[in-house]
Image (spheres, grey):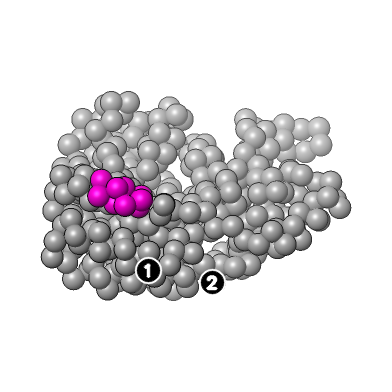
Amino acid sequence: MIPVAKPYLPSREKVDSYIDSIYHTHWLTNNGPLVQKLTQRLADHLGLDANCLVLVANGSLALHLAYKALELKGDVLTTPFSFIATASTLKWEGLNPVFVDIDKDTWNIDPNPMEQSITPDTSAIVPVHVFGNPCDVEAIQLIADKHNLKTVYDASHCFGATLNGESVLKQGDASTISFHATKLFHTVEGGAVITKTKELADKIRTKINFGIDGPDSIGMLGTNAKMSEFHAAVGLAVLDDIERIQTQRQDIWEQYAEALAPKYQLQKRHPAANNNYAYFPILLKDEQVVIDVVAKLAESGVQARRYFYPSLNSLVMFEDGCEASVSSDIASRIVCLPIWPELQSAEVKEVYKLVVGVVGS
C-alpha cells in the first residue's frame, strides 16, 4: 500500500532524548521548556520573531484564535478552494464566509473580483496559500488597506515557504500554520499563529490559557489551546531532521514533475516564491478522468486524494450562493499524488506510470 501521505517518524532514540527531559522536570504542559525551545528554534529556522510566534494545539485552533484576537465580525472574504477548516472555523465563530472565486492557474483566491463582494459588514479577508503557493499578497493588502479590513492568511501548507526571500508567514495581520501529522513539519497535532505585532501575540498567549493573565487574574475570555511538552518533543525531533525531509520531498516532487509536467497541468507557482514540495497536485481533463485515475491507483494499492474536493461554496452549511465556477471546475479535476519522505523512486515511477496508463499522453 502506498498512502497519499505518511507521517514522518524520527528515531525513537531522538524522541526519547527529548522526553527524558519531561520526566526530569515533570512539566507536561502550560508553556513548558520544550515548547519554549521549539518556539525559538522554529523562529530561527523560519526567519521569524519568536515574540510573534505562538504554538497551539492544532491548526484549526490557530484560525479560531486569530479571528478572536483580531475581533472579527460579520462577513469575511475567503476562498472556496481549501480544506473545510478554513471556512468552518469562520462559521463556528459566528462569522459569515463569503466566497470569492480563484485564479485558474495559481488556484489561489483571485483579488480581481474581491471588491465586488465587500460590504459595510465585511471585516476581514482570509486567503489561503494553496499547496504552499503564496497568494498575490500585494494586491490583497491594497484591497484590505483601502477598505480597512484585517487579513488572516491560512498558511497551513507553508512550512518553509518564502516570498521574496522571506517567510510567507510574515504576511497579513496574522498567519496560521498546521503541524498536523501529515504535514512537511509536524508535532503529531499542533499549529501556530504568527502575528504582525508582539501585542497581538501576547493577547493570543493569554487566550490559549483560559484568559489567565496573572496568578490571581483572568483578564479576558479564553480557552485551552496550549501545545503539550510531548507534542513539542516530537516537533523538536522532526525539526532535527527537517533538511533531510525537505531534500527527500524535493527529489520525489521533481521525479513526478519530470514525468508528468509535459503532459498535464500543474499549479502555476508565484515567480518570487520558493517551492516547499509539500504536495504534488495535477489537474486532469475532467472529473471522470479523475475518478478513473483514483480507482485505478486504488486497485494497485496506491492512495490518491481529490484535494480539495468539493469546492466549499457547494456545501449546504454555508449557503453562500456564490457559484465560484473556477473553483468548482478545478476541484472536480484535481488529484494529489503520494509524496512523503521515505517514498522510493520505484514507487514514484509506479504511481506516475499508472496515471499515464489511465490518462494517456
Q: Is residue 72 above or below residue 6?
A: above
Label 1 neighbour load within 10 Å: few <14, some 14-19, many 20+: few
Q: Going 13% across and 65% down the picture, which residue do you hit?
A: 361
Q: Going 60% across and 43% down the picture, which residue do you hit?
A: 57
Marker disc for residue 147? none
**In the rendering, at what x and y percent does residue 42 appear?**
60, 62
Residue 295 among those drawn in magenta: yes
**In the rendering, at what x and y percent does residue 255 appear?**
33, 71
The quadrant holding residue 275 is: bottom left
Which kind of residue does numbered mark 2 sit on? Arg
Q: Is residue 134 above or below residue 193?
A: below
The quadrant holding residue 17 is: bottom right
Q: Are circles 2 and 1 on residues that touch, CB within 8 Å?
A: no
Label 2 neighbour load within 10 Å: few <14, some 14-19, many 20+: few
Q: What span is colored magenta in the figure?
A: 294-303
Instruction: Look at mark 1 in the image and give the residue it sits on.
Output: 346
Foreground residue among 19 and 319: 19
Marker disc for residue 244? 2
Residue 195 among those drawn in magenta: no
SS at mark 1 in the image: helix
